Each structure stands twice: as C-alpha cells, then as structure tokens.
Image (tube, grey):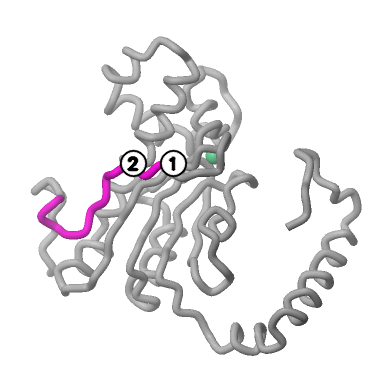
Amino acid sequence: MPHRDLHSKITNYNDLLEGNRKWVEETLQEDPEYFHRLAKGQEPPVLWIGCSDSRVPANQVTGTLPGEVFVHRNIANVVSHADLNLLSVMDYAVNVLKVKYIIVAGHYKCGGIAAALTNKQFGVIDNWLRHIKDVYRLHKAEVDAIEDPKAKEDRMVELNVVEGVLNVCKTTIIQNAWSSGQELSVHGWVIDIHTGYVKDQHVSVSNNDQMDKVYQMDRF
Ligand code: ZN
C-alpha cells in the first residue's frame, strides 16, 4: 500500500479514475480471475455499521477484501430506530445475506461525538447528533465524573457504541432472526485511531435472553 500523507495527493478529479485503472491492472496481475469471481455474487459474513469518517474504512481496518463485509456508515455510527436507510441495510444483511456477525464500530477522535458534546449549532446535523446527546443523558453521572475533556470524549465514543449495539438488538429484525434460530452475534468495537487497533468493548449479544425483557419482542 502506498504511503500517504494526511493531505490527500488527489488534486485533480482524473486522479481518481487513474487510481481505478491502476487498481484494476494490479489486481488482475495478481489474480486474473478476481473480477470474474466477484461478479458472481456476494456472501459476506459481516455487517459493519461504522462512522463515515474517511480514516476508518471497514475492509482495511479488518484486513478483509471486497465481498467480505456489507457496510453501512453514517456520521458517528449512530443506530437510530427511525433510520430507514440503516433498517433496510440490516434487513437485507440479516434476512437475505444471512450475515453471522454485526459490528458497530466507533472510533476515537470522532468529530460527530466531539460536536455533540458542545453547545454549538452546526446546522442540520444537530438533529442527527441529538442521538449522541441522548447517549450522554443515559450515562450522565459516569460521563460528568470524568474531568479530562479528552477522556470524556473517548468514553462517549465507547458508550455510543454500547448503545448502538443495544439498539441493533432491540429491532424486530434481530429479535426475529434469533427467535427463528439464526446464528447471529452483535459486537461493539472502538477503533483507536492513534494505533489502528480495535478495542473490543465486550458487549457482544447473541440471543434474546441477554436483552432486557421490555425489549424482547414476540413474533406476531
Ligand atoms: Zn466518526
């Protein structure tokens, strides 16, 4: 992989097309059948719910290839009950692709989390970031007890992931998959942007019994 500075070397739109040509040529040199195989379909075992931040791409972070991870990304990896986009991605991933693992992946130095901890208005995004303020409200005592602003922000990144995992599990998509015996586990990760390593938050859930009774949904 070529070394890259923080500032992109992409200065011209055509650089992107040139990058694509180079990637195709290099891939074919290594594996002439690569695209032929890829075109046959996908059976990814993983659904990734991550942040849109350009520094945390699902495949690179996990050392996986195209075809292995089904991806949804939004600002600050929010899992909202009313997000039709995410619900559609989850429905397809669980009921059609039959993924085995769902990973909610946050990352330190997340601009969305930092913004949500301020009292500034940023525009339309304020409505989206309100979900993160709700995470703060749920864990106010713990977060308020942290004095260092950086440590506070880091903990909020972690708590947003924990709540994201629970919100995934509360959906009828996941509840129904579990009650029909589908093998499926949901995990929470934080990517440490300083090292590249993932910190597993150890909040994995793999069946209904691990959920609070109020969120256990009977099938209709
Ligand atoms: Zn982020």
* Tag 2–tag 1 contact (CB < 8 Å): yes
* Of the image marks 2 and 1, the number of the one nearer the N terminus: 1
Q: Nearer the viewer, residue 104 or 81?
A: 104
The one nearer the camera, 90 or 193, is 193
Q: Which residues are magenta?
A: 199-210
Q: Provide the residue designation for mark 1.
A: 190
Q: Residue at point 53% right, 85% down? A: 41
Q: Residue furthest top?
A: 147
Identified at 52% across, 53% down, the residue is 73
Estimate the x, y position of residue 86 in percent, counting from the top left.
43, 57
Under mark 1, the amino acid is Val
Asked whether residue 201 is drawn in magenta, I would say yes
Q: Position of residue 102 (x, y in %)?
A: 36, 59
Residue 196 to residue 83: above or below: above
Which of the 4 image quadrants contains residue 203?
Answer: top left
Count of numbered marks: 2
Q: Which residue is drawn at the image coordinates 67% and 89% (left, top)?
A: 33
Position of 51 with respect to 199 (left or right) is right
Q: Is residue 148 left or right of residue 216?
A: right
- Image disc number at residue 137: none
Label 1 environment density (alpha carbons within 10 Å; few <14, some 14–19, many ≥20): many
Q: Which residue is mark 2?
A: 201
